[in-house]
Image: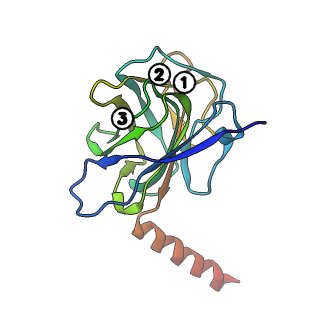
Amino acid sequence: MNMFVRTAAVAAAASLSLAAQGAISASWAEIGSDNASFNPPAVVYSSMTGPYAAFPAGPALGTANYTSVMTGASETLTQLRFVGGVVTANTSLLFTFFDSAAVELSSFTVTLSQGGNFIWTINLDESDGIDVAQIGSLSIAGVDGATGQWFLTQVAPTVGSQTPVSGPFIHAFELTTVPAPGALALLGVAGLAARRRR
């Protein structure tokens, strides 16, 4: 299958009170490419399988209520993938994460260099401090008049679960996180315990 992947540094600003932030970058692949089924090891939620459908382009792209498979109440986001995009190149989208009580946890803005709909991969650094809830929601909206689409799929998530948006349709996106330091310590202790049993 012919796959086109473009990578571009993007202007990004996280709505955080951090002194230093890592670089946020975005790349895109054609819809229908093999890139849609890629699942790195730390994926905690994934509903990227097509075929896809979408509502007409608008300033509010949508909100998805999801349940991830992360072990903690929240973890730091390192990668977000979604199917969709902006109508006009070099316009921005705001990604906002909420917990199950609809309290905002974190948000960031990304300027997408390409107009049109693609499979977008947004890479974040742990220092960006974008926390996502184990059970929560993701909202995507245009910034400063930007419009776009967030595609839907009828295929059940391969990791986690999601509340349908309309009929059987759910939003197509994927979350990859880094476990909190406490969760990593527990994994280390569990590994030591398993090693001692041998």
Q: Quadrant of residue 52?
A: top right
Q: CA distance from mark 1 to mark 3?
A: 20 Å
Q: CA distance from mark 2 to mark 1?
A: 8 Å
- Whole-percent x and y of residue 12? 35, 47
Which mark is first along the chain, 3 or 1? 3
Q: What number is the disc on residue 165?
A: 2
Closest to the observer, 25 or 192: 25
Please tell me which residue is depicted at 55% across the width and 21% down the height of the picture: 169
- The disc labelled 3 sits on which kind of residue? Ser
- Whole-percent x and y of residue 21? 32, 60
- The disc labelled 1 sits on which kind of residue? Leu
Q: What number is the disc on residue 152?
A: 1
Mark 3 crowd level (few <14, some 14–19, many ≥20, 10 Å Cα): many
Q: Classify 125 as above or below 93.
A: below
Q: Classify 88 as above or below 98.
A: above
Mark 1 crowd level (few <14, some 14–19, many ≥20, 10 Å Cα): many
Q: Quadrant of residue 142?
A: top left
Q: Classify 181 as above or below 116.
A: below
Q: Which is more foreground, mark 1 or mark 3?
A: 3
CB-based contact (under 8 Å), mark 2 and mark 1:
yes
In the visual, does 2 lie left or right of 13? right
Which mark is first along the chain, 3 or 2? 3
In the visual, does 136 lie left or right of 38? left
Q: Quadrant of the N terminus?
A: top right
Please tell me which residue is depicted at 71% across the width and 83% down the height of the picture: 198
Closest to the observer, 145 or 47: 145
